Image: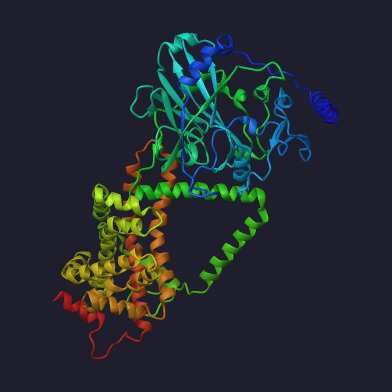
């Protein structure tokens, strides 16, 4: 009965082939098949340079940060009864289940394999199935030795890797990746008598090359290390996070960062083509898709033989880049731009998947977002209110509008205050770099890992303190500027007053910083730390306009925020988001448009953009302080000293 079923299945497949007018054996034009002429030498050469595959370690099953898959024999999907062979057409009908290598032989682009699960919503299905199918199988690479026509003095040794699932921005079933070595040789024997001259690593639609003796190429003797990017499986020369802004680089961020696991690979040598459907490698002659049919980048990939570089390795090698863009570590505006780029691309990919899988859910989400924004905008008053007097009840919309008008009319003076951010950012970068060089501190951070508050405290200490000091200084100068009568406002005078109150401002800054960092360091105290950050927003204003010292200014700010914590938090969040989002947006646009610029340029650009816009934020926050004072019934404080009187005392 099983024999009759197999015969019937083969007859059905042959009928389909005739129906679509396919030829039985694909045509492959190329040079002589070196592996078939010298099989022993081919295997020796392939084994000698077999790559060591480095995979990002996975902390737990279904952990999306690590790499759950590895290079395996393509046999895990061949003759697999849970894998369907489908024909492109109305509803993509199933031709058969569990197609063998012979069944795939000669099939063209009108066919595709379909694995269990939905490729755009993988969940943990693919990982569990992969673990089942690959159990007991070694990490495997396929070697192909080829000479390109017109280049008789060059020999390419290619290594192809098969991956069960690609879990990156362009999610799809199956993935074919690889590297290749170039020899100045005409035969396999000549290649065995020398060393490679260069090596190329495939990365998405392009790749990167290196000289064989270059320092960036890590090797274990003759075996090159291949750092496979988690999810995308693009091949890199080292452990890092890489950024791509084109088809050749990939559009998004690839991560080969550690901790990692290293695997030696078993090698299977492939011929240029296969002519016999009974050959165990007959799947090589399959030109259809190795995964579920989807649109664009989500479509299952074709196999090695369908790639141009299969028989044109030199042409492919000549198009490779000499380097890749490494995202530098450290707390800097440049890293924030790149981090935003990575997150935006990943988010955009998710929305594109949502359009495909659940368009109604996406539409509902967009409509809900618009409704929430309109509700917030409609809840406030956007009428024009002057920024003077400072202590006056103003609605949220009025504060934003008044701050905008004040900035537009006084930008030349206000921008001078924002320039303090430029040296602050430089100091933050230097401080972070110096602290990272301290061996003991590095050991503490490595021991603590990302799961504790230690890394957060380090980031706050290195970058947060100078940035906080700059923010306090800008708010202090803006407060002094706006509290002065309109005709007497002077940027120089505001700077002088801030300098005169420097001791109280420094005391306020350090006291607030220590309290928030201590709460953050405890981890469980993080919510209280966030609460205190909002409570302390008006401390510099209390120093400048009410003549208070550090402790008293924090207490005064806490009293003003009492009963309006959420209002203050939302308003301050909106104010501070403006310069940050603007700087990020400008950086992203230039990051995509000017790919040749160094990364430090984007850090400098963001610093300047932030410095230009932060006075607008400080103006709005100062008006928010005036609103809080007015709400608490302290616009006129009787015998107590008013903010204006304190300012006059500071001038004296």
Whole-percent x and y of residue 557?
A: 31, 77
Residue 408: name its quadrant. bottom left
Whole-percent x and y of residue 563?
A: 41, 81
Q: Residue furthest bottom?
A: 639
Residue at 61 percent of width and 61 percent of height? 367
Whole-percent x and y of residue 521?
A: 33, 63
Residue 94, compared with residue 520, is above or below; it is above
Residue 364, compared with residue 74, is above or below; it is below
Asked whether the viewer can see residue 49, the reply is yes
In this rendering, would 310 be left or right of 196? right
Asked whether the viewer can see residue 587, the reply is no
Q: Nearer the viewer, residue 379 or 350?
A: 350
In this rendering, would 413 be left or right of 323? left
Can you say which quadrant of the picture contains the C terminus? bottom left
Residue at 40 percent of width and 12 percent of height? 194
Can you say which quadrant of the picture contains the N terminus? top right
Residue 575, compared with residue 238, is above or below; it is below
In this rendering, would 309 be left or right of 25? left
């Amino acid at each position: 009965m099983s024999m009759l079923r197999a015969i019937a299945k083969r007859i059905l497949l042959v009928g389909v082939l005739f129906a679509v007018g396919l030829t039985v054996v694909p045509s492959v034009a190329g040079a002589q098949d070196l592996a078939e002429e010298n099989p022993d030498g081919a295997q020796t050469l392939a084994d000698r340079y077999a790559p060591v595959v480095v995979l990002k370690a996975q902390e737990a099953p279904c952990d999306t940060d690590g790499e759950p898959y590895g290079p395996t024999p393509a046999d895990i999907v061949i003759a697999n009864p849970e894998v369907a062979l489908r024909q492109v057409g109305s509803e993509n009908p199933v031709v058969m289940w569990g197609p063998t290598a012979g069944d795939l032989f000669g099939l063209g682009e009108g066919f595709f394999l379909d694995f269990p699960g939905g490729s755009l919503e993988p969940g943990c299905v693919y990982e569990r199935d992969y673990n089942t199918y690959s159990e007991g199988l070694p990490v495997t690479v396929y070697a192909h030795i080829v000479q390109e026509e017109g280049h008789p003095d060059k020999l390419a040794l290619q290594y192809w890797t098969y991956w069960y699932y690609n879990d990156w921005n362009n999610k799809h079933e199956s993935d074919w990746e690889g590297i290749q070595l170039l020899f100045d040789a005409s035969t396999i024997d000549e290649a065995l008598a020398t060393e490679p001259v260069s090596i190329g690593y495939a990365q998405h639609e392009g790749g990167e090359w290196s000289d064989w003796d270059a320092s960036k190429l890590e090797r274990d003797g003759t075996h090159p290390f291949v750092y496979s990017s988690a999810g995308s499986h693009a091949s890199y020369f080292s452990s890092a996070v890489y950024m791509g802004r084109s088809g050749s680089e990939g559009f998004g961020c690839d991560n080969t960062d550690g901790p990692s696991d290293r695997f030696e690979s078993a090698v299977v040598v492939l011929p240029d083509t296969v002519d016999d459907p009974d050959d165990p490698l007959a799947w090589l002659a399959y030109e259809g898709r190795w995964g579920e049919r989807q649109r664009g980048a989500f479509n299952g990939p074709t196999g090695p033989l369908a790639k141009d570089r299969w028989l044109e390795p030199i042409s492919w090698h000549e198009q490779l880049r000499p380097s890749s863009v490494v995202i530098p570590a450290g707390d800097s505006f440049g890293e924030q731009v790149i981090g935003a780029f990575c997150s935006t691309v990943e988010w955009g990919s998710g929305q594109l998947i949502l359009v495909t899988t659940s368009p109604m859910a996406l539409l509902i989400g967009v409509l809900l977002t618009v409704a929430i924004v309109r509700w917030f905008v409609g809840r406030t008053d956007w009428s024009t209110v002057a920024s003077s007097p400072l202590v006056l009840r103003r609605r949220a919309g009025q504060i934003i509008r008044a701050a905008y008008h004040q900035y537009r009319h006084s930008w030349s003076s206000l921008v001078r205050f924002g320039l303090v951010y430029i040296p602050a950012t430089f100091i933050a970068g230097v401080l972070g770099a110096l602290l990272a060089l301290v061996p003991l501190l590095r050991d503490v951070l490595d021991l603590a890992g990302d799961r504790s508050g230690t890394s957060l405290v380090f980031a706050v200490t290195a970058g947060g303190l100078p940035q906080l000091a700059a923010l306090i200084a800008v708010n202090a100068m803006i407060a002094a500027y706006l509290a002065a009568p309109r005709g007497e406002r002077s940027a120089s005078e505001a700077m002088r007053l801030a300098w005169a109150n420097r001791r109280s401002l420094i005391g306020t800054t350090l006291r607030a910083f220590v309290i928030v960092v201590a709460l953050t360091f405890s981890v469980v105290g993080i919510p209280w730390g966030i609460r205190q950050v909002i409570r302390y927003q008006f401390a510099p204003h209390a120093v400048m306009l009410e003549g208070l010292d550090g402790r008293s200014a924090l207490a005064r700010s806490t009293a003003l925020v009492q009963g309006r914590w959420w209002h203050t938090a939302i308003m301050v969040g909106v104010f501070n988001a403006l310069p940050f989002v603007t700087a990020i947006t400008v950086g992203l646009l230039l990051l995509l448009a000017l790919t040749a610029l160094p990364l430090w340029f984007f850090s400098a650009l963001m610093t300047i953009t932030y410095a230009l816009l932060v006075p607008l934020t400080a103006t709005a926050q100062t008006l928010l302080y005036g609103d809080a004072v007015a709400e608490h019934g302290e616009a006129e404080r009787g015998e107590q000293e008013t903010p204006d009187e304190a300012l006059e005392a500071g001038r004296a």
